[in-house]
Structure formats: C-alpha cells, structure tokens
Image: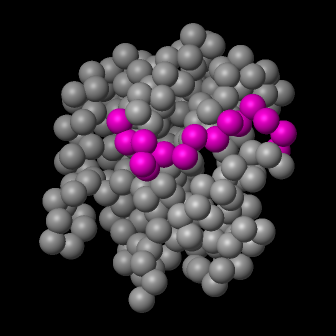
C-alpha cells in the first residue's frame, strides 16, 4: 500500500500560499494519488465552527491557542489520520507551525505552553509510536511583510488576523523562521516574492526532489 503523505502550507497572510495548493493537488492526482485538501483551523464541522470564533471574536491569547489546538485535535482524528491510513496525500493550508508563529511569536504567548499542547494533541496518534504527528513536508511561503500587506490591501474585508499591523506580521515571519531553523529537514522555504510561475516551480521542486511527483506533472 502506498504510504500517506502529509504536506502543510505555511506563511503570513498575503504570502500567496493558497493559490498553489490546487496546483500541487492536481500534480499528485496525475501521479494516481488520492488527495485530501483541507485547512486549519477547520476541516471538520466542529473545527470550522471554532474557526469562525477564532477569526472573528475578540479573545485573549490563551483562549485563542486552546481553540486552535481543540480544532486541530478533531481535525487530526476525523480527517488527517484516516486519510493517511488510507495512503492518501493530505494537503493542509496551515498546521501547528502557524500556531507557534501567530499565537507564540505574533501574540507573544508562552512557547513552552504551546509545546505542551502540541505534545498532548499530536502525540500517540501513530501506531506503536509516541512521536508527534507532523507534516512530512512544510512548504513555507516566505515573503516580506510589506509585500504581503500590499497584497492584503487589495483583498476582501480582513478578519482579525489579516487586520493586524505590519509589526505583528514581522513577528509572525520571525516565528516561521524559528520553526524552520528547528526542523530544517521538514521545511522547504519558498521565495514567495517572485513571479507566480517561479513560485510554482519552487513548490514543485520541493516534491520532485523527494521523489513524490514527476517534474511537469501539472
């Protein structure tokens, strides 16, 4: 049976990551793989309800972090783990790195508490292993916060994260850099301040280098 693959897409709001998820999904489908497209917070009815609260309701950083991990637990048990057990490819728009970047670095919340929540929520899900469930690959769309802000200014009405200051997003970007430094083998840094075809080429290369797709599959 083909092993499941778990790939997360990360980056500050306005980085452009979401526009490339469908392209990678198609590339895997061309290879004959079943693909599950999902997102965080969200991906299940319960998690989508929590998403609405997180994005639109004022709350303190602890409430925010707890809701993120509660949504993640339901998402893992209901969608991600069953898909991986079937041998599917799971493409997820954000995962735990976003919580460390946004709630940890952006909000200034205690990283040690986040690490504890990460162990509780993501540990013990794999057969005969206490290892944390983490993506096999995290595609990090790295873009200067000023560029992302200019992109967001042309978008829809912002949610409570998108409406944050550039200083906030600079802290979030630093948080992603810190997570990448901690797990460099898991991360593929994408220069997202490049023309769209070049960004896509970088995303595709991150998977072809691992032997998961054939170059030019989409």
* Closer to us: 156 or 109: 109
Specify the farthest residue to the front: 209
In the image, which residues are magenta?
182-196
Residue 142, given in percent of the width and then of the height, sits at 62, 33
Residue drawn at x 28%, y 26% as measured from the top left: 111
Q: Per the image, is 42 magenta?
A: no
Viewer-proximal residue among 54 and 26: 26
- Pick whichever, 17 or 120, lies toward us: 17
Q: Is residue 133 visible?
A: yes
Provide residue 66's location: percent of width, then percent of height: 31, 36
Image coordinates of residue 201 in percent, x first then y, are 75, 53
Query: Where residue 26 sits: x, y (%)?
Result: 72, 70
Residue at x-position 71% and y-position 26%: 148
Residue nearest the viewer, comparing 98 with 159: 98
Where residue 10 sits, quadrant-wise, is top right
Does residue 105 sit above or below 36 in this rendering?
A: above
Q: Quadrant of the N terminus?
A: bottom left
Residue visible at 63% across and 84% down in the picture: 32
Q: How many marks?
A: 0
> In the image, what residue occupies the spot 38% across and 42% down?
183
- What colouring style does the render use? one colour
From this viewpoint, is residue 101 visible?
no
State the image quarter where residue 78 is shown: bottom left
Q: Where's the C terminus, which quadrant?
A: bottom right
**Vertically, is 142 above or below 105?**
below
- Relative vertical location of residue 132 with respect to residue 166 in this rendering, above or below: below
């Amino acid at each position: 049976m083909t092993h499941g693959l778990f790939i997360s897409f990360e980056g500050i709001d306005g980085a452009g990551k979401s526009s490339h998820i469908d392209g990678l999904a198609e590339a895997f489908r061309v290879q004959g793989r079943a693909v599950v497209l999902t997102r965080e917070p969200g991906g299940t009815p319960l998690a989508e309800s929590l998403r609405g609260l997180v994005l639109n309701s004022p709350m303190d950083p602890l409430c925010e972090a707890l809701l993120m991990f509660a949504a993640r637990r339901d998402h893992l048990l209901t969608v991600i783990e069953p898909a991986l057990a079937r041998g599917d490819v799971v493409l997820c728009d954000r995962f735990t790195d976003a919580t460390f970047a946004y709630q940890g670095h952006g909000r200034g919340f205690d990283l040690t508490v986040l690490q504890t929540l990460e162990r509780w929520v993501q540990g013990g899900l794999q057969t005969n292993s206490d290892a944390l469930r983490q993506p096999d690959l995290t595609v990090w769309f790295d873009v200067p916060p000023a560029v992302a802000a200019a992109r967001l200014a042309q978008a829809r009405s912002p949610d409570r994260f998108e409406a944050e200051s550039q200083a906030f997003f600079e802290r979030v970007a630093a948080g992603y850099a810190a997570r990448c430094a901690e797990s460099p083998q898991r991360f593929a840094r994408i220069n997202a301040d490049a023309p769209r075809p070049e960004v896509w080429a970088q995303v595709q290369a991150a998977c072809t280098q691992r032997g998961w797709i054939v170059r030019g599959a989409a």
